[in-house]
Amino acid sequence: MLITANFATWSARKGWIDKAVSSIIDQVDIVRVYYNDYAPKKRNDIIQYTGEDLTDRGKFYGIGKGEIAFTCDDDLLYPPDYVESTLERMKEYPNCVVSYHGRKLKGKGLNYYRGHETYHCLQPLSFDKTIDVGGTGVMAFNTNDILPDVCSYSQQKMSDILMGLECKKKGIKSICLKHNFGWLQVLTNVKSIYNDQVMNCDEQNRLADEIFLFN
């Protein structure tokens, strides 16, 4: 099967996307990058897309059957053993989506960002945890098990929770994998989706409630 790494980016991250890609390109067969709001300099070593502004949903653009898809963030550096280690761990959880970041929903009517149990990819986690919403910047899945249609949704800057909803609808478990502090590194906190959305998350709260109904 093809091993792919899939990114979405935008003009505010021009200084970081190439660094993020460079950290993983030698670990996979194909790298795809969706450029939301600008035309990039042409590269022959990756597949480049431009089009309507899909925000973070663009990291799912072009993913097809017959691949192990890694969805990635344009502000992270991936360690040299990232893909190999993740593929080994996936053997323990067949037919599941795995991530190194996520949320376990604690109930309905709660604030999406502050009301649930959160496991962060930049903080250590000493055990594997079944979650309801996985972080799509550090996620992997077999597209023969699930081929998510995240790009078809209208919500912007919500790929994590939209993927969580897709998994619940299709009966696919999500697992947050244990990891050490410093294994993943962040390049910048400028213009992060969390900072942009944390004070205005009514739609995230609604979708979280919808996901919780599947529990």
Image (cartoon, grey):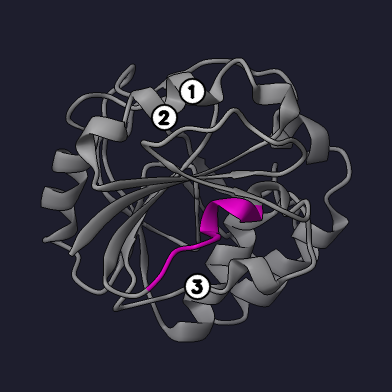
Per the image, the residue denoted by label 3 is 148
Q: Residues within 10 Å of mark 2 (few under 14, many from 20)?
A: many
- Expressed as whole percent of the image width and height from the top left, the position of residue 93 reads 19, 65
- What is the three-letter code of the residue carrying label 1? Asp
Q: Quadrant of the N terminus?
A: bottom left
Q: Amino acid at mark 3?
A: Pro
Disc 3 from disc 2: Cα separation: 22 Å
Q: Is residue 101 magenta?
A: no
Residue 215 makes an appearance in the image: no
- Inspect the image, locate mark 2, and give the three-letter code of the amino acid beneath it: Val
Q: Earlier in the sequence, mark 3 or mark 2?
A: 2
Is the residue 153 above or below the residue 110 in the image?
Answer: below
Q: Which residues are magenta?
A: 57-64
Q: Please tell me the numbered disc located at residue 21.
A: 2
The answer to which image quadrant residue 178 occupies is top left
Percent position (x, y) of residue 183? 29, 22
Residue 33: give x, y in percent of width and height: 52, 43
Circle 2/circle 1 CB separation < 8 Å: yes
> Label 3 near label 1: C-beta < 8 Å?
no
Q: Are marks 3 and 2 in contact (CB under 8 Å)?
A: no
Q: Secondary structure at mark 2?
A: helix
- Give the residue number, with chain letter if any, for mark 1: 18
* Frontmost residue, 207 versus 43: 43
